[in-house]
Every structure is written in structure tokens, then in C-alpha cells.
Image: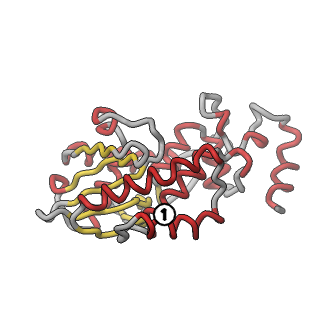
Amino acid sequence: MYINSISESRSKTFNQCRLKYKYRYINRLREDEGVKKDAMSFGSYIHRIFELGHDKSSLADLQIIAQDERKNYHITKAYEKKIDVCLKNFLRLNSSLYKHLAAEIEYSIKVNEDKDISFIGIIDRVIEGKDGKILILDYKTSRKEMTKFQLYQDRQLQGYVYAISQMYNKPISDIMAGHYYPQTDNLVTVQFNSMQIRSYVKNRVDEVWKIRKLKAHEFPAQMNEYCKWCEYKDLCPKMSDPMLIEERVACRDKL
């Protein structure tokens, strides 16, 4: 199955369930919106406020953005009280940062010798310090935080570091990456070494070739702990009547 790009979300989906990968990235089927969680909507909402308000210095300014964007997201009462907490903490973070370089920056970096494989993704924010070094921020709106040890294993951050090193022509040693948790006002950062990033690049390229070698029928459903959150439950042969799948696909694509 020929592909020419890979992102961490695509890689994660492929390793969770090959059929889910096929539905989402090959068949490009619409997801079941009803499966999306309130937390996901809240996270998208806060990300959008931070994107538009990266240059704001007052709570009132951020609240105006929040109000304007509210109509585009489903925010339940349970999450309403968390909004101002996130905004106030974001302002404190902003006051400690030196120079904003980019927000919601999309990238596509060609990586292999033949230049037919690209790494793609979106980075929440890129900051430059007074010393010229770079900080990559990935906003996480959950209260559940990752430790530094866990972040050292985080492939998404490794991918971001590689992308920024290429885009800004910076050595890996001049780039730091981390998760910022606006609910707790905590920033957890790590610094990868060149060997880790080279290993990351090799593994992602190998994964692209692995997918390329698969035939259309070699994307089976994989039952695991992620199934209960899957947006394609109604199409899964392990969770549905196989005789109805084709009919459901046709009906859903007409919506």
C-alpha cells in the first residue's frame, strides 16, 4: 500500500489497529462524531484560544477570544470552570517566554535519500530564548502529566525536534521540547541527543516501508484497550456484523 508520508498520529494509529489506519488514512472514511469525548472538544478549544492569543497579555483579551470561539466547540458544564484556570496559567507562561516564533506550525520534511518519504505534523508552538536556542511547546489539557522519563520515550516530541532542527537549521543540542499543562501550570521539558533523533528517523522510515509492503487485505482489526474509544466501531468486523459493514460505509459516506 503506497504512502509517501508519515506522522506520529498515523504511526500510532497503525500500531494500535491496522484496520483503523486503513479506514482513516487509506479509505478516508468519516469518523463517527458521536464517539468523540468531551475532553477532546475541550482540548481543541483551549488549543485554539492559545493559538489566537499567543500575543495577548491580559485575561480580558483571552476571554474575548474564548467567547468568540465558543460556538465552534461543545463544552460541557464540567469543563466550563476549567477555562479561566487555563487562561490565567497561560498568561503566566507567556510572561516568562522570550520570543514567539510560530504557533500551530505545519511541517512536511523529506527525509530519505530518494526524497519520496516525508514526515508531517503540526507543532503547537515554537519559542526562541535569549540565547538563540529553541523551545518546542506541546499543550496538554489533561491534568494527568507525563514525567521527564516518559517524555524521553515520547516519539511525537522527537519528531518535533527533528522537524524544527531542519526548518530552523539548528543543531539538536540547541532544541528543547516539552509538554505544558495549563490546568496545573506545569511545564515538563526534555532534551534529546542526536543519536535518539537519528534512531527516530530510521524507525519512521522503516515503518513507511513496512506499510508500503502491505496488500489491501493485510490490514486486520486488532482488539485492544483502544477499541472502546474507536471512531469506527460500527465498521469493525470484530465488533459488528460483517454483513452490514458495506451498507454502513455507503450510508455514512452520503452524510
Q: How many marks?
A: 1
Residue 115: x and y in percent read 37, 65
Residue drawn where x is 35% and y is 46% of the image = 185
In this rendering, does residue 202 appear at all? Answer: no
91 w.r.t. 178: above or below: below
Residue drawn where x is 17% and y is 60% of the image = 133
Q: From the image, tell me which residue sits under label 1.
A: 49
Q: Nearer the viewer, residue 146 or 89?
A: 89
In this rendering, does residue 233 appear at all? Answer: yes
Q: Residue furthest left?
A: 131
- Is 206 on the left-hand or right-hand side of 253? left
Which element carries disc 1, helix, strand or loop? helix
145 w.r.t. 96: above or below: above
Residue drawn where x is 31% and y is 62% of the image = 126
In which image quadrant can residue 118 be found? bottom left
Residue drawn where x is 26% and y is 45% of the image = 189
In which image quadrant can residue 26 be found? bottom right
234 w.r.t. 75: above or below: above
In which image quadrant can residue 91 be found? bottom left
Residue 175: x and y in percent read 21, 55
Q: Nearer the viewer, residue 36 or 154?
A: 36
177 w.r.t. 63: above or below: above
Query: Which amino acid, by three-letter code, is at mark 1?
Result: Ile
